[in-house]
Image: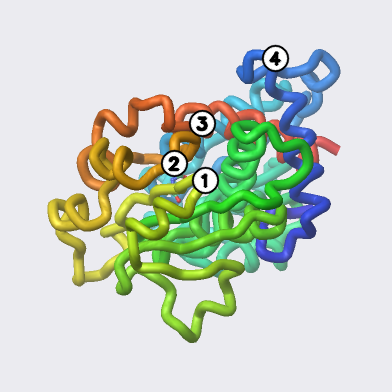
Amino acid sequence: MHLIGLRDMAAADIRAILDDAERFLDDRGEVTTPPDEKQRLQGKTLALLFMEPSTRTRVSFEIAARRLGGSTVTVGAEGSSLVKGESAADTCRTLAAMGVDGFVVRHHDRQLPHVLVDRLDTPIINAGNGSGEHPTQGLLDALTLRRNFGLKGDLSGLKVAIMGDIVHSRVARSDAHAFAALGAEVRLVGPRRLLPSEDRLEDWPATVSNSRKEALKWADAVVVLRIQQERMHGQLVDPHQYALDWGIDTTVVDRYLKPETVILHPGPVIRGVELSDPVVDSDRSLILKQVTHGVAVRQAVLCRYVGS
Ligand code: NCD
């Protein structure tokens, strides 16, 4: 079994993974591993193939694997045979021949996870394929919303704005599919050039807006995204202007947000651009809770896809 995206995942499966992830959080909401899961990956080796920069996703998978008794090997672009011209698929086949039991893969090529699924029998977990999907982020964000609003099964009735650089964001795509599958209303918000074009909207289970004010007044939760300049090939966004037009600072919060509206961000946050310092560190911010929930979700995912 592979985890490539949430687009085609049934709501029941998404809910089941979130329910499993709850078992990896204690009464205070901190990461735990029940005694019967501590050996779940005993004797198994997970290869973390990270060909794009990552801190939290990579370390989170590593911690999750170790908490389940598994071991990890990390392969980055630097210092691997990829710099000699080997294809990522051949690197994975080589590692599989060494007895690796599962792959966690991040790569700029959107097709790579599908190529790997065709060419390998080993479980593949997508940790970000270009601007494609980032399924474990979608799951951990859904879990964060579900827990914050005290919802048991799904996210019915919740209004979620995803704001910023939607068009380059794999997080936006996985979030939108997860939230919509669980019954939330999703609205994509940002400057026109960073929103999906009209003819692409059918890919998105969401409405679109380019009014910061209207979206923030409407939302129960706002997922704020980084401007992904590295995917813009030339036409960059001016961070100062973006902060003025689209950033969320305390004035914007006070003016538009309902008292109970929360702010999420997958990280890395560029302080002073999409969110101001005090907003990042405010009680409305669930950013560190997302990180904690990430370890729980990844333990649940590894049990399900690699553990049995
Ligand atoms: C994101 C990513 O790499 O897709 N970060 C993450 O995994 N938590 C978002 C980003 O890079 O802005």
**Residue 170 shown left or right of residue 214 in the figure:** right
> Label 3 amino acid?
Val
Judge the density around disc 1: few (<14), some (14-19), many (≥20) Cα neighbours within 10 Å: many
Of callouts 2 and 3, the N-terminal one: 2
Of callouts 4 and 1, the N-terminal one: 4
Of callouts 4 and 2, the N-terminal one: 4
Which residue is the site of mark 3?
291
Q: Residue at x 26, y 36 (%)?
A: 250
The reply to whether callout 1 and callout 2 are in contact (CB within 8 Å) is: yes
Q: Residue 108: x percent and y percent? A: 44, 61
Which numbered tag is attached to residue 258?
Answer: 2
The reply to whether callout 4 and callout 2 are in contact (CB within 8 Å) is: no
Of callouts 1 and 3, the N-terminal one: 1
On-image quarter of the C terminus: top right
Which numbered tag is attached to residue 27?
Answer: 4
> Relative to residue 190, is residue 294 depicted above or below?
above
SS class, disc 3: helix
Which residue is the site of mark 1?
220
> Label 2 amino acid?
Lys
